[in-house]
Image: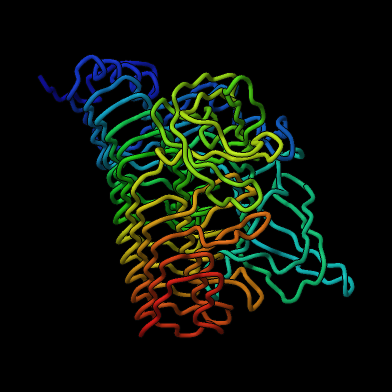
Amino acid sequence: MSKTFYFSEFSGEGTAEKLNAAMAVLKDNPGSTLVIEPGEYLLTTELARQAQANVMSGAWGKDPQPFMFNPDYKYSVGMDFSGHKDTTVIANGVKFIVDGFMEIVSMSDCEGTTIEGLTIDHKRKPFSVGTIKNCTTVSETEAYFDVELDEGFEIQPGTPIGMRYFVYNPHTERLEWPDLYAPHGKYIDERTVRYTGKWLKKNIDGWRYYIWHTYHSRPAILFQRAKNVTVKNVTVHSHPGMGITGNRTENILVDGFRDIPAEGFHMSTNTDATHYTACSGDLIMRNCQFIAQGDDATNVHGYYHMVIAENNGRYTVRNDFPDGIAHTQTQDYPDVGDTLEINDHMTLTCLGTRKVLEVKRLNNRECELLLDAPLPGDPVADKTFVFNVSKLPRLELYNNLCKGNFARGFLCKTRDIYIHDNIFEDIMGTAVCVYAEHSWREGTFSRDVRVENNIIRRCGHLGDDDDSVSGIELGIFTEEPPAEPQIKNVAILNNSIDCPNTGKAISVKYVDGLTVKGNVNHSCKQTLDISSCKNVTISQ
């Protein structure tokens, strides 16, 4: 029988212990609800504080990602849904102030779980911010400026300050590249950093400057090996990694999620607002706001695995993802009964499909597969890829706002995609991207894509040439172009694109079955670039 519990009923030293106690009781009472009373709660552990200290002191180097983004990394979890069934956590009016670096919510190995209303921020943000002073041009090829860090954002001599950095332009009201070519940061004192480079084109004294100290780490919210999970009206103001990361999860609803800066700031999470890998079922994100995060608003994909050995009809395949084994640092592997597409290593062209009969996991990156038929050719010599198309979600993204982030808006590498009625503003890269990426081992080629009724304004401002794409881009990034289109059945309808001084509003390559109708280009240099496509219909 379902029950309702209140957070104030539980005891423990600090929020973390009380959460552990509460979640243990709910795990034993499937279908129950936990109500966390409104207020601010300090969430911390010794391990979380030590992780932040290691980053800020430089103990983990100039780029702490290798320490924080690997399978052996030890970390704390605030709210753990592991083993839960039909648990709901209501946290309206609740703010977790996190002291340290940790995973705030973990929905792993659970079913039917919901979290609603929570706000997440950090006591000491995982980035630093200050004001630019002393803009100085020494010569045509040497210039510098100082950043006077705000109180509370002191750094140490070893603090990473050369990873990623942006200015907040008060005139355009968005994050932009600093107007200094190849800046190199130098610690001056705990409140001052000097950036030296070339060709400082204008005086930017008084502008705000943001300095990243991490890239990937544990996410604020994790979905993993879960089913029927919901995040509703949750806000993340800052995090030393992604806002939401999902992996091997079936049926995800993200409704009213906000990855947005805290009041008085211009930056939210350090990397992607959301990121989903090897998921299935329905993935729906609606009524969300993705503002000023340090990478894409979302990236939805699976992984290409390379065939590296064959033994008596069994194939060893390896995930060569450049940043680690996967975005959740757990192995990506197929299940028995899954369908694998076979892909040419250079072009990603589909060479056929196979069913998985047996799976043996060998280590974090490799597994051995028995398939229902041999792979074509010499898959080891050819470095053939296999891709699990059974772990691709149907994706719907609507009524969302994407604004002012680095990289791209929606990056989609799945099948059955419907992107409609969204607003994209001031994104540094392209607003909507549908393509596979060989270098990241992320794919696959999409099928049945509809991009409709979206408003795209001032995006693509990071690009500086006529070849850049600001609005909508479909294509591939491969070692060699495929001989035939691999993306199938695409409709681009009634989108409004107003991105001044950018190259292309819409670019489409390698699509079989393309309909383009009713789109309006207000200010891009070129409206539509189509190449290597067939069965194309264009109308106004």
Q: Nearer the viewer, residue 368 or 103?
A: 368
| Quarter where residue 143 is shown | bottom right
Q: Residue at x 34, y 81 (%)?
A: 518
Q: How many marks?
A: 0
| In this rendering, position of residue 26 left or right of residue 310 | left
| In this rendering, position of residue 16 left or right of residue 179 | left
Residue 427 appears at what percent x and percent y?
A: 51, 65
Q: Nearer the viewer, residue 392 or 16?
A: 392
Q: Residue at x 56, y 42 (%)?
A: 126
| In this rendering, position of residue 433 left or right of residue 60 | left
Q: Residue at x 88, y 75 (%)?
A: 140
| In this rendering, position of residue 84 left or right of residue 105 | left
| Quarter where residue 496 is shown | bottom left
Quadrant showing the C terminus: bottom left
Q: Is residue 239 visible?
A: no
Using the image, determine if residue 447 lies above or below residue 354: below
Q: Is residue 149 visible?
A: yes
The colour scheme of the drawn protein is rainbow
Q: Nearer the viewer, residue 457 or 20?
A: 457
Residue 164 appears at what percent x and percent y?
A: 66, 52
Using the image, determine if residue 257 lies above or below residue 463: above
Using the image, determine if residue 94 lies above or below residue 317: below
Residue 101 appears at what percent x and percent y?
A: 53, 33
Quadrant showing the N terminus: top left
Residue 166 appears at what percent x and percent y?
A: 63, 60
| Quarter where residue 379 is shown | top right
Using the image, determine if residue 381 lies above or below residue 410: above
